[in-house]
Image (cartoon, helix red, strand yellow):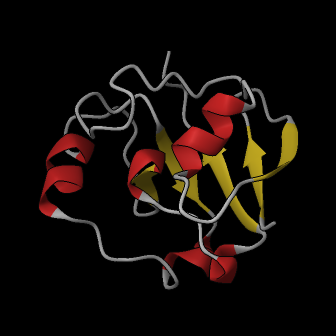
């Protein structure tokens, strides 16, 4: 099973297996990774799964869709590598992806 490296808002590293097809938000939420609030349950309606994707992984991700873009416009501390973890589905090609969870509290 592919793994995701989550860095929580306090800088602690969590390496977790996430099944193909699950979102990165679901993987973090199911493992109770600190900072992954996920209030809307993955509907891209709240921004509480805002995360910063490590640079080398950005080009491997699908483009930001209109719904995600509209929500990212409202999150605090948006950066060029900001994404909503609920909009990124795990694939074998993403094995080892690293993301830092924003302070979503």
Is residue 101 among the parts visible in the rendering?
Answer: no
Say left or right for 61 vs 93.
Answer: left
* Residue nearest the observer in this picture, 5 or 31: 31
Point 73% across, 29% down: residue: 33
30 over 66 or under it: above or below? above
Q: Give percent across and percent down for residue 100.
A: 65, 46
When asked about the image quadrant of residue 54, the answer is: bottom right
Q: In which quarter of the image is the N terminus?
A: bottom right
* Residue nearest the observer in this picture, 13 or 94: 94
Is residue 60 among the parts visible in the rendering?
Answer: yes
When asked about the image quadrant of residue 73, the answer is: top left
Point 57% across, 51% down: residue: 24
Q: Give percent across and percent down for residue 84.
A: 40, 48
Q: Give percent across and percent down for residue 66.
A: 12, 60
20 over 28 or under it: above or below? below
Point 15% across, 52% down: residue: 67
33 over 57 or under it: above or below? above
* Residue nearest the observer in this picture, 92 or 83: 92
When asked about the image quadrant of residue 19, the answer is: bottom right
Point 83% across, 48% down: residue: 16
* Residue nearest the observer in this picture, 31 or 47: 31
Q: Give percent across and percent down for residue 91.
A: 60, 74
């Amino acid at each position: 099973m592919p793994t995701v490296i989550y860095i929580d808002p306090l800088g602690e590293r969590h390496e977790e297996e996430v099944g193909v097809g699950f979102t990165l938000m679901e993987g973090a939420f199911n493992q109770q990774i600190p900072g992954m609030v996920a209030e809307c349950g993955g509907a891209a309606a709240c921004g509480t799964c805002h995360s910063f994707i490590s640079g080398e992984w950005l080009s491997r991700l699908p483009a930001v869709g209109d719904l995600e873009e509209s929500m990212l416009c409202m999150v605090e501390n948006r950066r060029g590598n900001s994404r909503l973890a609920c909009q990124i589905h795990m694939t074998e090609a993403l094995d080892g992806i690293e993301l830092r969870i924003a302070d979503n509290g």
